[in-house]
Image (cartoon, grey):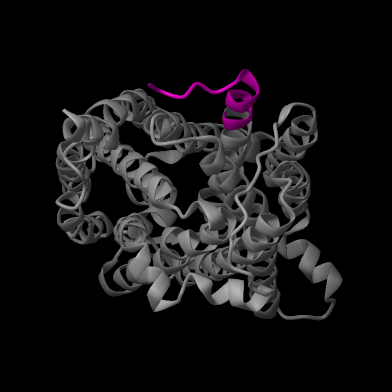
Amino acid sequence: MKTKLSWQQWLTIIVFGLIGQLAWAVENMEFNLFLFNRIGGSAGDIAAMVACSAAVSTIATLVGGIISDRMGHRRYFLCIGYVVWGIMTALFALISREHTAILFPGMSTAKVLAMTVTIVIVMDGIMSFCGSLANDASFNAWVTETSDETNRGTIEGVLNVFPLLAMLIVAGTGSILSSLLGWPAFFIVIGASVSVAGLAGLLFVPDTKPVQSKEKMNFWESIVYGFRPSVIRENAKFYLCLLGICIFNISVQVFMPYLLIYLEKTLGFGNALSGLVMAVIILFASICSLAVGRLVDRYGKRTLAFISVSLYCIGLFAAGFLTSVIPFIIAGIIMMTGYVSILILFSSAIRDETPVDHVGMFQGIRLLAYVLVPMIIGPMIGSGLINAVSTQTYVNSYGETVLLPVGVLFTASAVVGLLLYFFAFRFPKQTKKAADAARKA
């Protein structure tokens, strides 16, 4: 029988899940566009920013998860963390080359550019640190402790709608606000939304009770605990799932940091049409996400895994060759349907296999696979392909010529994605509940 959640638990999942993904969508997509268009950075600068953010996020989640495991009260880590996260996001409104020139008078134009790019990367790292403490270390641990194997597919179905909705909202409002009011207004609106959610959460977020480990370890022993060979052997299914999601996210990060730039500049869709293309793709994928979550809880993961990987790779291969609006939308819908389904399958499996007495600490291990390794390797592959293959250029607002992303990014992502078929075989044919019932019969 499926475990039911209270209205407070569902409200927490919906509010903090959606608002957190809004902030991450800004960090993962709009910061790249901001750095490229407004500041004048290059594809290499974007890759460096993504890698720096990934490293900081992983460290923050590992440390924050251990601390919240020991102290309990994930509610306060979650809510207060969102308040600070929002403030750091809003501070991006102050960053510009003009402000850098004022702070460092007499600096040459080239040095002003380099300094401003550095400021953006450092601030992105600080913002990612705060976000990882609040969302990755606290919210994800809270969800794992709140849910169980009977309802995680449904919960993941809901949670995985939010990144898509966040992409839609951010792409739409980002284009409008940055065009009408400028980038500062956009960052302030998003930052304020995150902080208000954190304050409001103090009124309704129920706390969880982390299971305390029987092993007595000091802080540094806790840091290395998840890397011990004996721990890896004891939790082999957990680490196998992490390897799968790592490969998947490497595939995603080959093209995702450059997606908006590709749509707006390479294909020439512009702001408004790019937003419409994203909207149509995301709406279809969101509907699919809710359906897939229920199917996972009911029928198990293996068959859905094969279908999901196939859709993802087929959509990517097609997107790499299509340049007109309608065909690209069709390819995007196929790709994003597979994308969302893969996320649901792996995310629910990872929650199922997370050791219950180290939930917070294992969020840091999880982020190694979700964020650190993919966000270093993926953008490096993407940036390398752009530098090696691209012949299209773009003159930014400062009159500087930069290389544009190319369709081969999607092809490379699909090639990496094919490795996921190996992990599809490892998913059980039945749900654990169905398997237990079969054994008892």
Q: Nearer the viewer, residue 309 or 209?
A: 209
User: In the rendered view, does 393 fall on the left or right side of 432?
Assistant: right
User: In the rendered view, does 19 fall on the left or right side of 299?
Assistant: right
Quarter of the image where one finds residue 114: bottom right
Q: Nearer the viewer, residue 198 or 88?
A: 198
Q: Does the magenta segment cover residue 441?
A: no
Evaluate whether residue 354 shows in this view. Answer: yes
Query: Looking at the image, is 398 positioned above or below residue 151?
Result: below
Query: Looking at the image, is 400 positioned above or below residue 360?
Result: below
Quarter of the image where one finds residue 164: top left
Tell me the residue at 68%/80% (across/down).
111
Quarter of the image for the C terminus: give it: top left
Quarter of the image where one finds residue 97: bottom right
All told, the count of numbered labels is 0
Question: Magenta residues?
Answer: 1-13
Tell me the residue at 61%/27% (across/down).
9
Evaluate whether residue 33 shows in this view. Answer: no
Q: Does the magenta segment cover residue 11?
A: yes
**Could you tell me residue 136's position as x and y percent?**
58, 52
**Could you tell me residue 360's position as x and y percent?**
59, 55
Q: Nearer the viewer, residue 344 or 73?
A: 73
Tell me the residue at 40%/31% (across/down).
157
**Could you tell me residue 285's position as x and y percent?**
33, 30
**Could you tell me residue 322's position as x and y percent?**
19, 43
